[in-house]
Image: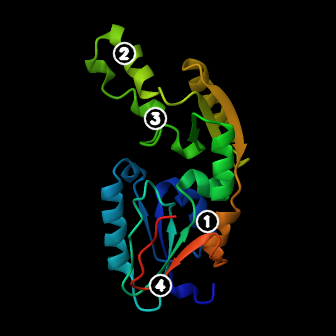
């Protein structure tokens, strides 16, 4: 990056463990809770608040997000440039491109994706569908879980080839077997994230919103 001291980061915790080791340790940053994905309006509000709090004239603020259910659509900065990967969500970011994400989804309809650090988090549908079951009569619980998972039939693990992968594979295989899902491993491609952090921002792969320009729908 040309002016490292003027580059700042706002990232979802879903990507932070990947992005943070790639940036200058002294880079100003804020990491937002992964659970904000469950409420796009709240996510948009928080990102907007953090931009206003941290931006200064001449800043570049890189966003560790995708469009995220259109939550980032319309977001803008008054003084800084915003740089956002052109992907729908964190899954697309970790698959390396919107094009690959769409191809994977087309070839694997009904696939729910997890990454090792997402297991057991607010974006883990298997974890979330267990909440509150203690208040439901035991005989009705399978029906409730089946309803929560009705749009999915496959579980895809985003595999970085890191040390925690083996444990994640065991966990995901167990979840898939429990719910009669097909289990698939998808090698991740971190090139897009690396380019986000290194300043290789081509318009084909990144939204570059100048001060006053809103992030568009794409």
* Distance in Å between CA atoms under marks 2 and 3: 15 Å
Q: Taking 120 as reference, is 218 above or below it?
A: below
Residue closest to the far top: 139
- Mark 1 or 3, closer to the camera: 3
Q: Which residue is mark 2?
A: 141
Q: Taking 133 as reference, is 164 above or below it?
A: below
Q: Which residue is mark 1?
A: 21
The mark nearer the N terminus, 4 or 2, is: 2
Q: Which residue is mark 3?
A: 125
The mark nearer the N terminus, 4 or 3, is: 3
The residue at the point 58 percent across, 50 percent down is 91
Mark 1 Cα within 10 Å, few/some/many (few <14, many 20+)?
few
Q: Which mark is residue 210?
A: 4
Specify the color scheme: rainbow
Residue closest to the far bottom: 57
Asked which secondary structure carries label 3, the reply is: helix
């Amino acid at each position: 990056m040309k002016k490292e001291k003027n580059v700042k980061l706002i990232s979802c915790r879903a990507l932070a463990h990947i992005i943070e080791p790639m940036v200058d340790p002294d880079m100003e940053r804020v990491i937002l809770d992964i659970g904000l994905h469950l409420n796009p309006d709240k996510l948009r509000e928080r990102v907007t608040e953090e931009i206003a709090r941290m931006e200064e004239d001449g800043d570049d603020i890189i966003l560790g997000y995708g469009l995220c259910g259109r939550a980032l659509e319309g977001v803008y900065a008054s003084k800084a440039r915003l740089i956002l990967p052109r992907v729908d969500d964190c899954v697309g970011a970790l698959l390396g491109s919107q094009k690959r994400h769409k191809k994977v989804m087309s070839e694997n309809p009904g696939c729910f994706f997890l990454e090792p650090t997402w297991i057991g988090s607010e974006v883990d549908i298997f974890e979330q569908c267990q909440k509150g079951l203690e208040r439901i009569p035991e005989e009705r619980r399978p029906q409730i879980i089946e309803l929560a998972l009705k749009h999915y039939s496959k579980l895809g693990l985003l595999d970085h080839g890191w040390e925690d992968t083996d444990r994640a594979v065991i966990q995901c295989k167990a979840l898939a077997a429990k719910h009669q899902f097909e289990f698939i491993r998808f090698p991740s491609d971190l090139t897009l994230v690396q380019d986000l952090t290194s300043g290789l921002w081509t318009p084909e792969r990144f939204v570059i919103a100048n001060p006053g320009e809103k992030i568009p729908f794409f």
